[in-house]
Amino acid sequence: MPAYESRVDVPSRKKFFYPVNAELKEYLNKFNRNIKLPVVYSDLLRFNMSIPLLDKNGVDTLWQTVYYDQSEMNELFPNLIHIYVLMSADGDQQIGENLTIAQIDYCTFGNSKPFRIRVMNRFNDNYDYFYVKVADASRVYGLELEHILSPNRITYLTDGHTLIEEHISGLPGDVFIKQRMNTSKFNQIRICKEFVKFNERCFIRLLGDMRSYNYVVHITPDIEGNQYRIRAIDFDQQSYEGRKNFYLPHFFKENTPLVMLGMKHMDKATMRQYQEEERALIYNRMKLVNYRLSNLLKVMKADQISTQDKVDRLASELSEYHRKISFTKCHTMGELVEEQLLTYIEKKNW
């Protein structure tokens, strides 16, 4: 990562919500992301009791486990299972016969105020999760860009003001930094490589606020050591803030241990190599999904997903960073994302 220019301060206010407009809904219909759901977000608000959810050490997680009247459960739970089957088994309802809703948790401090649904298999007690959230256009754009430009496929569905997301498994980034960084030199080098590539992915598509608890680390044992993949789990800050450094994870103080590890194990040439590898992968994905990406950017360019002062500030900072005046001619966040992608296409022979 480059030397520090400045730290990134945490946003002082929660971001505005921007509704899914008709053009974005049409795009979601075209690519089978928007369907009629048997449960919408407001249905889950009808709980009659909640208790704090504690972790295994008795610490408050800031989630609340919620409970419903029996009549509500009789209606909600089969429909939630139906949604899970739609996402995980393409709607094959026979899959749902062994499933039950084991727990529903509610988070009031998140931007999207999500409900986390625990689905359990009655036969072997294995369980999985999915999330029900308030649909926000910024988050939908973030999920879609993640699906088509990152190495990770992601499943989500929308219905009006409701957004359904799959659970992204992995070790939370803050936990990983505290507990899994003290490993072999070989593994540490692979961690550094992945953080550089993650940093590059976020900046190229302008995904912001990747503090350590907004991503997870997936660890895969390999022939020698481990392989690491960092995956974003929070897409609320897709192209919203006006500060360039907000889209570079290495500027967040929560990620400082990863930055210091990189400085220990990499020189500028090595870091450059990993950046170029990731740029090449993104460029190849852009060619493969050109039709879908063009459709998405057309909708995104016409949409308002941030305030004009943030757009203008980011345009100015990106123009200065890339030394390209074309950024200052952009008037929406969608236009800035397109210009950012075009800039890296131009650099494909870097």
Image (cartoon, grey):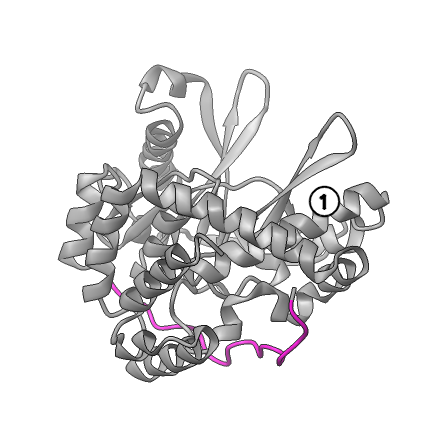
Say which residue appears at 29% left-offset and 81% top-offset.
308
Which residue type does callout 1 highlight?
Arg
Q: Which residues are magenta?
A: 2-20
Question: Which is more toward the observer, 168 or 263?
Answer: 263
Q: Is residue 137 left or right of residue 73?
A: left
**Looking at the image, can residue 189 be seen?**
yes
Using the rendered view, name the quadrant where residue 204 is placed: bottom left
Q: Position of residue 79 (x, y in %)?
A: 32, 33
Is residue 348 or residue 238 the one in the foreground? 348
Say which residue label 1 marks.
190
Q: Is residue 87 magenta?
A: no
Q: Is residue 252 left or right of residue 314?
A: right
Residue drawn at x 52%, y 22% is: 121
Is residue 18 located in the magenta-colored stretch of the structure?
yes
Q: Viewed as shown, does residue 344 lie left or right of 188?
A: left
Q: Is residue 32 above or below residue 120?
A: below
